[in-house]
Amino acid sequence: MSNLQKKTDVILIGAGVMSATLGSLLKELVPEWDIKVFEKLGSPGEESSNEWNNAGTGHAALCELNYTNEKADGSIDIDKAVKVNEQFQLSRQFWSFLVNKKMIRNPKDFIMPIPHMSLVQGERNVEFLKKRFEALSNNPLFQGMEYTENPEKLKEWVPLIMEGRTSNEPIAATKIDSGTDVNFGALTRLLFDHLKSKNVEVNYKHIVKDIKRNRDGLWELKIQNLDSGKTEYHTAKFVFIGGGGGSLPLLQKTGIPESKHIGGFPVSGLFMVCKNPEVVAQHHAKVYGKAKVGAPPMSVPHLDTRFIDNKKALLFGPFAGFTPKFLKTGSNFDLISSVKPNNILTMLAAGVKELSLTKYLIQQVLLSNEKRMEELRDFIPNAKTEDWEMVVAGQRVQVIKDTEAGRGTLQFGTEVVSSTDGSVAALLGASPGASTAVHVMLEVLEKCFPGQMKGWEPKIKEMIPSYGVSLVKNPELFKELHTSTAKSLELIEEEPVLVHTLDEKTNNGNL
């Protein structure tokens, strides 16, 4: 076995946006380290990072109502929204650094500007949205947000949603133009192209079968080459498990104490997609509504403009589904085989607690296509069945763990689990995920390389200027960085506006 063992400094499991981000950060901080990547599929960004497997919202809490809860006294808690927004700013800064250094050539290949909107109906929801707007618009991170209850204004903002609307219910929306649509699949592929140019060895069609600790403290990975069928053994000082839904079973194989009492609950998603150019042309925004009572936070209905392969499309959803697989390309035995003696009570407690979620998922699975069209028509009254097709989105595995709130608590969000000595780390969970990849990978570095962080800090601040600084408390810095990243990422287009003004003057306003 030993003669087949290949030593390296860092092994990244999974070729998604998380491994791509961590690899890119490490290559800047310690270019001399050897990094190897192992991916089960044939190319990067094929599971959760793929552009058809997520909504592509640059999650900055500009429109997602589940990040701003109403407190018992009726006031709006914006803490989570501020936190998510600050985390997204770190991603923007790092992507901007990569573009400025020509490591990514064309930002339009992965990021486009698009207004982010929240839209609600009914008196109570309108009142909530107004209070949310008032709470957020006083915050420097959310400046530029507009609010309206005026149907005429809404027709300007979202003609497709307003056309044919007969309900007399009050309706309101907020809009902010600094939102983005991010093609995380394209971004992942660009980052892996960059990593390969930096001599990172990327192995596709290689599946990690086992992970164990050797006596010398190194981690040994048993890896099968899916093309040849051969088994290889690789050792590393540091292993990152970034395999999306597949991370939990691999984390369990490490046997580290931190992997105990953690379970995973898989939730699949479906989106309805419209590619009819006439319909697509009538909508230019990401519009988020409110989740139904009893629905989980990741099921907030939204109608999104997407830019995929330089083509514009509309996505509506997500509709939740259930399969026991932890990945789209996983096995039907994933869920059952993840139940271990150390987490069975955690899993059972979650089952009892989450009966409403289970009921919701069953209802969603049983929805007919016509029922889904009815939900779409809540957003687009004139939607025609023939314009929309169903796409199966990525598989999400929500973390279940014992917390202060009790045993078997379902977590919504992403979570880094690492060993005490920092030699292995895994990323579990889902949304806002990819949008906050840079923040999450900085957390991995802080947890796993505490001794090196002081020495790395100047370089980190060169890549991510607001690292370690609160942007809310430094509004001038936020403004400066938001403007500079928008410029680097080509999210502001100054020239067309100037040309338009000149045209007006030239034609004396008769356009």
Image: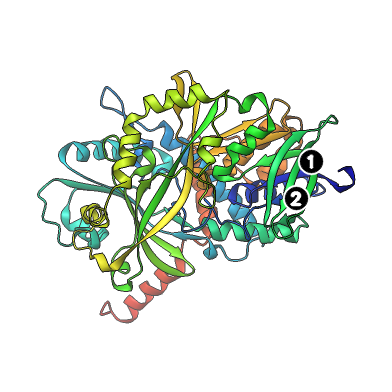
Amino acid identity at mark 2: Lys
226 or 116, which lies in front?
226
Image position of 164 (left or right of 372) = left
At 80% from the left and 41% from the top, the residue drawn is: 235
* Residue 243 image-quadrant placement: top right
The quadrant of the image that shows the C terminus is: bottom left
* Residue 151: mark: none
Q: Position of residue 410 (x, y in %)?
A: 44, 30
Type of residue at label 1?
Ala
Residue 99 in view here: no
Q: Residues within 10 Å of mark 1 (few under 14, many from 20)?
A: many
Q: Which residue is mark 1?
A: 236
Q: Mark 1 or mark 2: name the one nearer the start of the chain.
A: 2
Residue 261 in sight: yes
Front residue of 434 and 243? 243
Q: CA distance from mark 1 to mark 2?
A: 9 Å
Residue at x 55%, y 61% (from the top left corner): 186
Residue 470 as seen in the image, left or right of residue 455 = left
Q: Which residue is mark 2?
A: 36
Specify whether 199 is left or right of 435: right
